[in-house]
Amino acid sequence: MLKTFTSALRDFSHLFFPHNCLGCGTDVLDNDAVLCLQCFSNLPVTGFMQQPNNPVEKIFYGRISVQSAGSAFYFTKESVIQNLMVELKYRGNKHAGNYIGRLLGMQLAETTRFDTVDVIVPLPLNAKKEKKRGYNQAQVIAEGIQAEWNKPILNNSVARKLFTNTQTQKGRIERWQNMQDVFEVKDSEALEGRHILLVDDVVTTGASLEACAAPILQVPGTILSIATVAYTIL
């Protein structure tokens, strides 16, 4: 009887407060769920977190010194992962960002490859862009990671000093040129001698992450690893 009443109450509440899966749009899901069971089970897991020399690590070969790197999921157009990214970056849905951060955090917690990480550094967003959006999406993801993998977050140790246009429509060389001298370390003492996990939403060419990593690695004693929610195949 109670189960029937609870089900009826949920159906009634959905009439006035729709709650839909961010993957396929169905309303057949728990009230606190982001994805339905089918979309969750179809997430394109990469397995990179457990795999040395994976495609994300190979992006940075010969460019910067990275101890470990990986992405939780593959990114493709018109996919569940793209829907979640759009919700986070363009529709103000921080809940979606926290959710994908938690999924990334679970994968980090399940592997030993990132065990020596001391702190998480979200890839900084330019102050003007962050003010317009209201938050830094990488920071929201980092907070989701922290909920599953208990590591401190440093939000102000590195800054993006220059405003850059979106990288989406740029090629590999243009992306790299667009990111030159964009980042700076603001608090070297907070980074010195520590293993830093640099976090972002998606990695494609790695230009933004490389540009941010370069000044971090100039701080004495730093070790760098990288984790993103998704990996784009060019």
Image (cartoon, rainbow, N blue to C red):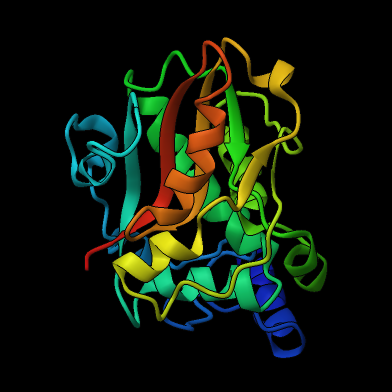
Closest to the observer, 220 or 143: 220
Q: Quadrant of residue 109?
A: top left
Q: Looking at the rendering, in which quadrant would you find the N terminus?
A: bottom right
Residue at 56% across, 79% down: 20
Residue 120: where, in percent of width, then height? 59, 31
- On screen, residue 126 versus residue 44, left or right, reads right
- On screen, residue 45 versus residue 182, left or right, reads left
Residue at 22% across, 64% down: 233
- Judge whether 51 appears above or below 8 on screen: above
Residue 22: where, in percent of width, then height? 51, 75
Residue at 18% across, 39% down: 54
- Judge whether 100 appears above or below 60 on screen: below
- Judge whether 160 appears above or below 157 on screen: below
Residue at 70% across, 90% down: 15
Closest to the observer, 90 or 181: 181
Residue 80: where, in percent of width, then height? 39, 72
Q: Looking at the rendering, in which quadrant would you find the C terminus?
A: bottom left
- Judge whether 123 appears above or below 196 on screen: below
Closest to the observer, 158 or 7: 158
